């Protein structure tokens, strides 16, 4: 049953992909901006990624760090045994 | 290879990852396996994001994938803690033991295919006692 559902899902996704790639020009169909059709990534990818993380997404990075801290504390609070059970 | 073909290949791999994760999530009953399958679905989506980021040649997709990984790490920690708690309660990782958590008004799912019986416990090996047991001193006075 689950395998059937998975095969159906995969077939649907592949069908949509095939139809999209055959039928439309992806650059014109999905483009939201007026940039060049196939621009190139910056050469130093990691440096540019760090730059964009600490300029445009600085707030999100801080929130992600806070989320990690809260998740760590929560995991410890959930999973830690009480002191009486240890004895 | 044209950029479109490259994107297509990445998307196909992402779709396969997602479908595999969904099959595993629906078919398996072990809590940890289900959790790992959910992670696999997440990675399929992240692969789509990276492929589109490369196709569009901007970095937003990669940055968003980093945030997805962050949230996935948090989720992994919490999920493993919860699984540990559930295992301590029932001594089993089977999800069907936790049907009490279903929504109200939903019928209880009946197992058409019950779990195989647990394997018999292997008795722990016994070592022949070596040495001499020291004599226990008796209490001499009872007050």
Image (cartoon, coloured by chain):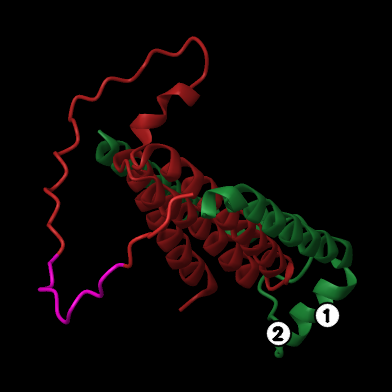
| B116 in relation to A39, above or below | above
Q: Earlier in the sequence, mark 2 or mark 1?
A: 2
Which chain is mark 2 on? A
Q: Which mark is residue A46?
A: 2
Q: Is residue A25 visible?
A: no
Residue at (77%, 82%) from the top-left corner?
A48
Q: Which residue is mark 1?
A: A51
At mark 2, the secondary structure is helix
- Viewer-side residue, B48 vs A83: A83
- Viewer-side residue, B32 vs A29: B32
Where on the picture, by quarter, is residue A66?
bottom right
Say which chain is green.
Answer: A
At mark 1, the secondary structure is helix
Q: Residues within 10 Å of mark 1 (few under 14, many from 20)?
A: few
Visual hue assigned to chain B? red
Q: Residue furthest top?
A: B105
Percent position (x, y) of residue B88? 44, 44
Would residue B18 be found to the left or right of residue B62 on screen? left
Percent position (x, y) of residue B98? 41, 30
Residue at (52%, 54%) from the top-left corner?
A87
Query: Where are the magenta residues, as a range?
Result: B125-136
């Amino acid at each position: 049953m689950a395998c059937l559902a998975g095969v159906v899902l995969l077939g649907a996704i592949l069908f949509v992909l095939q139809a999209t790639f055959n039928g439309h020009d992806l650059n014109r169909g999905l483009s939201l901006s007026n940039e060049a059709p196939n621009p190139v990534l910056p050469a130093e990818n990691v440096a540019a990624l760090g730059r964009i993380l600490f300029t445009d997404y600085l707030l999100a990075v801080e929130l992600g760090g806070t989320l990690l801290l809260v998740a760590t504390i929560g995991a410890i609070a959930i999973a830690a045994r009480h002191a009486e059970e240890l004895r | 290879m044209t950029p479109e073909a490259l994107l297509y290949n990445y998307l196909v791999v992402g779709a396969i990852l997602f479908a595999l994760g969904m099959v595993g999530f629906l078919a398996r009953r072990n809590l940890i396996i289900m959790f790992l399958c959910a992670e696999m679905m997440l990675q399929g989506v992240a692969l789509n994001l990276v492929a589109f980021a490369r196709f569009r040649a901007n970095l937003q997709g990669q940055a968003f994938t980093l945030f997805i990984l962050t949230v996935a790490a948090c989720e992994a920690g919490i999920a493993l803690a919860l699984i540990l708690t559930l295992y301590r309660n029932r001594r089993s990782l089977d999800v069907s033991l936790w049907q009490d958590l279903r929504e109200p008004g939903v019928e209880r799912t009946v197992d058409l295919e019950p779990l195989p019986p647990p394997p018999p416990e292997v008795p722990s090996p016994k070592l022949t006692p070596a040495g001499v047991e020291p004599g226990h001193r008796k209490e001499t006075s009872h007050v």
